[in-house]
Image: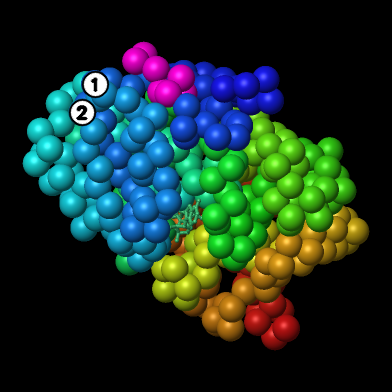
Amino acid sequence: MDDSDAVIRVETGGGAYDVTVGTGLIDQPECFPADVLGAEVFVVTNETVGPLYADRLTAALGSRRITLMTLPDGEEHKTLESFARIIDAMVAARMHRDATVIGLGGGVIGDMAGFAAASYQRGVAVVQVPTTLLAQVDAAVGGKTGVNHPGGKNLIGAFHQPRAVIADVAVLDTLPEREYRAGLAEVVKYGAGLDADFFSWIEANAQALLQRDAEALRVAVCRSCEAKAAVVQQDEREAGRRALLNLGHTFGHAIEVATGYGSWLHGEAVAAGMVLAGRLSGRLGLLPADDAARLENLLSVFGLPVAPPPISADRLLDLMRMDKKVLSGRLRLILMKGLGDSFVEADCPEGEVRAVLHAAAAG
Ligand code: NAD
Ligand code: GLY
């Protein structure tokens, strides 16, 4: 690690850990000390990320007993079947309770590796080594793990905080452009939902971010992780404030399910979802039109979708009712009073949501 690396501490009831953000971290043995990793390590990766980074990571892990498991790539594989395959492989490798699982990949691998770690022998340690922008700024931090169900996103899972998160921004060099831009949607989420200054910083640095400028990226990952850590520390299990991290997600998850997992990327669906949340907030007289326009404009600059796919309002609304934020049948949505000023609306009028979806479908 060098002076330009940053460490963000996350303190929760479920565990305290560091998120280290820097360049070249996956090659550095000091990122994986004995108090973070045990003697047995089970690395979960996929067929895309494994060939790029698994050798470098395992070289940094030193003389531990390492088992590498490679899963097929894709959101459509974030299933109970893949979860069962990981558990079967951990049993076959005779992993013990002091083993550590490492998730080497994007949010799909991180969520499944974390869920396997949460379940295996009632819980073993997990270290997240996120390799997408989306996973570095969001999925790897905060302890949400799980898999999808055909009826809903992430419907099966557990809270299980990692022992450490190693966010090496250099590995983002190989990320396909579309995936990179999808990650920018989650960066925008922190500004739009929680931090107006950060939103302005993203606007001012949009071109540097699009060019993957290393310093701009380091700042974006650090500020996003700091924002997420602050919320997770206050509300680890999403009794309240943590729901703010889901700005745009109720719409977005419905889009992901309706289009078939993997067709729209998670970040793309969240981008369109944030626009819809902005329009709904405007319609309810909460969000000034200028703020809604700035949000839509920034997402457009990043080449992200600002409208949902052609799916009926009724179908999307039906899927939104399966969202995990729905309580006692009431639609709970994250709305905005301004950029950086979001709140949980616990009983969103369905007629207004339907009207926004209809208007979007009509173009
Ligand atoms: P992903 O994991 O599918 O990765 C995107 C693609 O990039 C994949 O094809 C992957 O193989 C490839 N890839 C990853 N790293 C690469 C690299 N360095 N170079 C080249 N290719 C690389 O998608 P994602 O956007 O990272 O994650 C989305 C998932 O994360 C969704 O399932 C979502 O539900 C979940 N998520 C979870 C949380 C959480 O709090 N747990 C938060 C946000 C999103
Ligand atoms: N990605 C939303 C959360 O971690 O709560």
Image quadrant in which you'd find residue 268 = bottom right
Task: Measuring from the top left, give residue 253's x and y in whole percent.
Answer: 50, 61
User: Where in the figure is residue 108, as x and y percent of width and height?
Assistant: 40, 52
Horizontal and vertical percent position of residue 47: 34, 58
Write the residue at 48% across / 42% down. Answer: 130
| Residue 183 placement, left or right of 54 | right
Give above or below for 121 relative to 244.
above
Residue 231 visible somewhere in the drawing = no
Secondary element under disc 1, as helix, strand or loop, is loop
Secondary structure type for disc 2: strand
Residue 89 lies in quadrant: top left
Residue 274, visible in the rendered structure: yes
Colouring scheme, one of rainbow, by chain, secondary structure, one colour: rainbow
Mark 2: few/some/many CA within 10 Å (<14, 14-19, 20+): some
Is 189 placed above or below 60 here? below
Q: Is mark 2 within 8 Å of ligand 1?
A: no
Which corner quadrant holds the N terminus? top right
Task: Give the residue pinned by disc 1.
Answer: 39
Residue corresponding to mark 2: 65
The residue closer to the viewer here, 352 or 41, is 41
**Label 1, label 2: how far apart the Cα atoms are:** 6 Å
Image-based side of 173 in relation to 32, left or right = right
Residue toward you, 277 or 203:
203
Q: Nearer the viewer, residue 219 or 16?
A: 219
Type of amino acid under label 1: Ala
Give the quarter of the figure containing the C terminus. bottom right
Residue at point 73%, 62% (across, down)? 302
Give the magenta part as a residue range.
29-35
Relative placement, left or right, of 357 versus 206 is: left
Is mark 1 in CB contact (under 8 Å) with mark 2? yes
Query: Splitting the image into 4 quarters, where does residue 214 fall?
Result: top right
Amino acid type, callout 2:
Arg
